[in-house]
Amino acid sequence: MIKAGAGETPADVVIKNVRLLDVVTGAVTHSDIAIVDDRIVGTHGYYSGARLIEGGGRFAVPGFIDTHLHIESSLITPFEFDRCVLPRGTTTVICDPHEIANVLGAEGIRYFLECAERTVMDIRINLSSCVPATEHETSGARLEIDDLLPFRTHPKVIGLAEMMNFPSVLATDPGIIAKLAAFQGWHIDGHAPLLSDLALNGYLAAGIRTDHEATTAKEAREKLAKGMAILIREGSSTKDLDALAEILDENTSSFVALCTDDRNPLDITEEGHLDSSIRRLIAKGRPLHHVYRAASHSAARIFGLKDRGLVAPGWRADIVLLDDLEACSVTDVIAAGRLVRPEAFEARYPVAPVGLASMKAKPVKADDFIAPANPKRNMTPVIGVKAGLIITYRESATLEVSDRGLLPDLAADVIKVSVVERHGKNGNIGRGFVKGFGLKAGAIASSVGHDSHNITVVGVSDADMAVAVNRLITLGGGFCVARDGEVIAELALPLAGLMSLQPFETVAEKLHQLRLAASALGCSLPEPFLLAAFLALPVIPHLKMTDRGLFDVDAFAFVE
Amino acid sequence: MIKAGAGETPADVVIKNVRLLDVVTGAVTHSDIAIVDDRIVGTHGYYSGARLIEGGGRFAVPGFIDTHLHIESSLITPFEFDRCVLPRGTTTVICDPHEIANVLGAEGIRYFLECAERTVMDIRINLSSCVPATEHETSGARLEIDDLLPFRTHPKVIGLAEMMNFPSVLATDPGIIAKLAAFQGWHIDGHAPLLSDLALNGYLAAGIRTDHEATTAKEAREKLAKGMAILIREGSSTKDLDALAEILDENTSSFVALCTDDRNPLDITEEGHLDSSIRRLIAKGRPLHHVYRAASHSAARIFGLKDRGLVAPGWRADIVLLDDLEACSVTDVIAAGRLVRPEAFEARYPVAPVGLASMKAKPVKADDFIAPANPKRNMTPVIGVKAGLIITYRESATLEVSDRGLLPDLAADVIKVSVVERHGKNGNIGRGFVKGFGLKAGAIASSVGHDSHNITVVGVSDADMAVAVNRLITLGGGFCVARDGEVIAELALPLAGLMSLQPFETVAEKLHQLRLAASALGCSLPEPFLLAAFLALPVIPHLKMTDRGLFDVDAFAFVE
């Protein structure tokens, strides 16, 4: 490396003739980039090498780093995620295997670590801090500090993932304190929506350093002032970039990074990944080299990845070649010194899927979805949903009662929702009503159901609800749409009931078909599965459905 | 910490009523600062605590971090350095025990680590990479990779110290490569004066990340562009702040830090430590909060100290209280949560000094300094020195020959210089002539002699040279001035021949007396001991004297 950098011996790879963007000063310099093994050894000069990549005057910037995401939310395996996202310039991702851990526990984390050792991109892991996220639904697993400790020194592990249970932090719950204590000196990732003032101070006193949950510039500015790094999130369901763009400037760019949290392959295909966030931040007038800095060097520094984040001698050769800086039009990616080509993905030594038998629910029948009337009241509480929001609203309806219990009211757009426990723990079925899906017939069901990933089903017909749920049990998990006793669209997600074994292109196509099928049932939501997947998360206001019943998040208690 | 941060229980210490400078945005906020143990738990709010410190509206900024220095060059022990410098706001120093390691080897490093565990300030260690610095003088010790490895995981160790032997890096010398290889992933500190272009790339390809040797803005800008962090140095002998100030701006402040390298207690007392650098950078128009950022958070991030660098909840309570930000007028310092008071220094558990018998030279006589004439030539090469420069010049003189060899020529200011090996290895004495000291009588001697720390003596009289050298042997090392067979001023440095066992105030006073005594001999240099200490360093151009003889650094060979 030294000899090649000094120009005395040929480099392994030389990218000829690029315009190098300095994310420190904003300068652009014509240069070659010399690489040996996985390391940049020369810039700001001209080199010869065993293999040449013609830069053709393209721009070169450091590889992008997604600082917080759940790969499971892409519905594809880490290997497919690698193949889908790396060519868009994201060379490092810091993920939290929170979803698979809620289903499979430590086995899910082991699976991710094994994949991380073999992907072309560099996948780093923050260890899931809150499994289960809540005691108000039935999860597949529980991770205490003793379950996490064996992973702490794994070379792919950075620290503790998003500490979302901020009430328990502030209440100094012993299990949470044990986790925080064990990760002092490691990175501890935060997740503190709307936390402010002294409560935020208490949370930060635990050594928590990052946040991706700020949704307003004001919230982000308070967190920055208190030493948090802000990760500007732009996912499929949660979108904060428009609100937070203004906080990224010359002063803050070393304290701001980017993340996607949850982003599905349709959005990645249509809009992009971090390349999309970069493009939009620049379009909003954020200073260009500071945007690229936030996407690379700042992210690396914030998470302690000392080897990467600059295109400079001695740094990891994660490089993105672009036709245009403003448009962030990625044309080639070099990951750890290798030009990213399909063969690199084909050459990965495969990892056997896990959790293929994770759907442990027993088949259901139509009668399981009968919702008996509460003789004590006339009004039935109803969960209200709106497109693009994972928070729900408290609504109510006067529903007709038949010999099959309370009936949907299609005129009022009130239909049934159930959550079926599927981890083989207790066979719970929670039953209730939801408003806002627009369904006029059939049912749609999902085995992705944050955070415990039971089966969520919404529908007009008890029979179709049963067909949809039973189909998911047969598939080992997934999404499906049923009508008139038939499954009319489906996507199997047999890996822990969360991820497909298919190529990302197939998954994107099937997601498209599922949307069309739901729409054919009258569904008025553009993303009904995404919304269904969050109906069961009883830490998000206001009214949620879990396998244990209807939960009032504000009262923090089940509705009778 | 969590409960106190949230305001639910009292903090251990509360600094009431400060104006908090945000080194990220530059905002100034009225606030209290709540502390529990060594950690800040609350800012941007009002707190109660077991102990109150009245801020009185003073400014609060993060503690300063000196990113590269040799405590030995302060001539005092790490304990005295702590007491001298911490009250000036420097709460963390990253030091390289290079000088003591050249005398005592691993024992010297162990001594520093032991001190570092007990000082009030946080002393961190980079392990000396180049002991000896050169093969052209006799050192007391040699540190190979196997000597360094046992220290690598010590909690006070950051990484490998200044890799000054850049020719051997570029030549891929196996001993150097072994050290670089072993510290990949740790911090590797650089030292690469004037290195540029592809040679600099080769050096950086080794994973070296920081530099404190840039002496022009142009040099610093090339290094920044190639991913190096620049440590702006302002020492007693080496002063780069004026030249480098311009590189510190909004773009670069996260990639720039401050250091002192070598700074003696007289300068610290008279001008200050990092507080002086901060004051001067602001006076030169550098943006204020970016200067404070470079002095704190940037330094911490560059060297991987994740726990410090901001005044914010969850961060180490290293805080400086100032009356005035522009003047950097430090009035109080909080180190790891403790208000710095004399009692804190008195409470340190003492560390026994080491190297008290390191002066192993046998007594010398006047005849040992006879410089025989070279019958092959009339002209004698002479080392030329100038005030404030550690580089020397190649001069020559026609000297009178007597039965005692070549004689000094006082009219031409050409006097004798000798280096006496003192590690008990071979008893070498190098002999030659130097021009520029202005001495008209007597001799001055020093056991500080970079980097091997033999005894350097310059003088007019062979007899006085012997008196001075023999006195240093008796003292166990130090500085002294002799005249007419008598010692007229001295400072004992018995700890490895490098450091005093006296309080820093005494050392400063004795340094003052030594200057006066040298001046009384006619010495025209303001810092003759500093200059004498660098006369033996054969890696600095152009002509140097070692125990093995006169060395031509440009030809990289001894002069016949």
Image (cartoon, coloured by chain):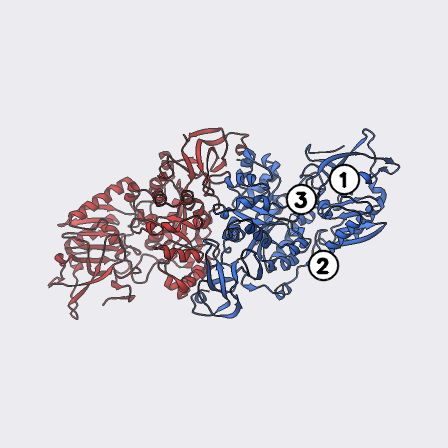
Chain colours: A red, B blue
Identify the secondary structure beneath mark 1.
Answer: strand
The dot on residue B142 is 3
Question: What amino acid type is highlighted by mark number 1?
Answer: Val
Tell me the crowding category of disc 2: few under 14, some 14 to 19, or many 20 or more residues within 10 angstroms, Cα based: some
* Towards the viewer: A31 or A464: A31
Q: Report, in whole angstroms, how far the alpha carbon at label 3 lies from the one at label 2.
A: 33 Å
Residue plotted at (26% across, 49% down): A476
Identify the secondary structure beneath mark 2.
Answer: helix
Quadrant holding the C terminus of chain B? top right
Question: What amino acid type is highlighted by mark number 3?
Answer: Arg
Question: What amino acid type is highlighted by mark number 2?
Answer: Thr
Q: Position of residue B279 (x, y in %)?
A: 57, 53
The dot on residue B434 is 1
Q: Is residue A500 above or below residue B85?
A: above
Residue position for label 2: B506
Relative side of B410 to B275, left or right? right
Q: Nearer the viewer, mark 3 or mark 1?
A: 1
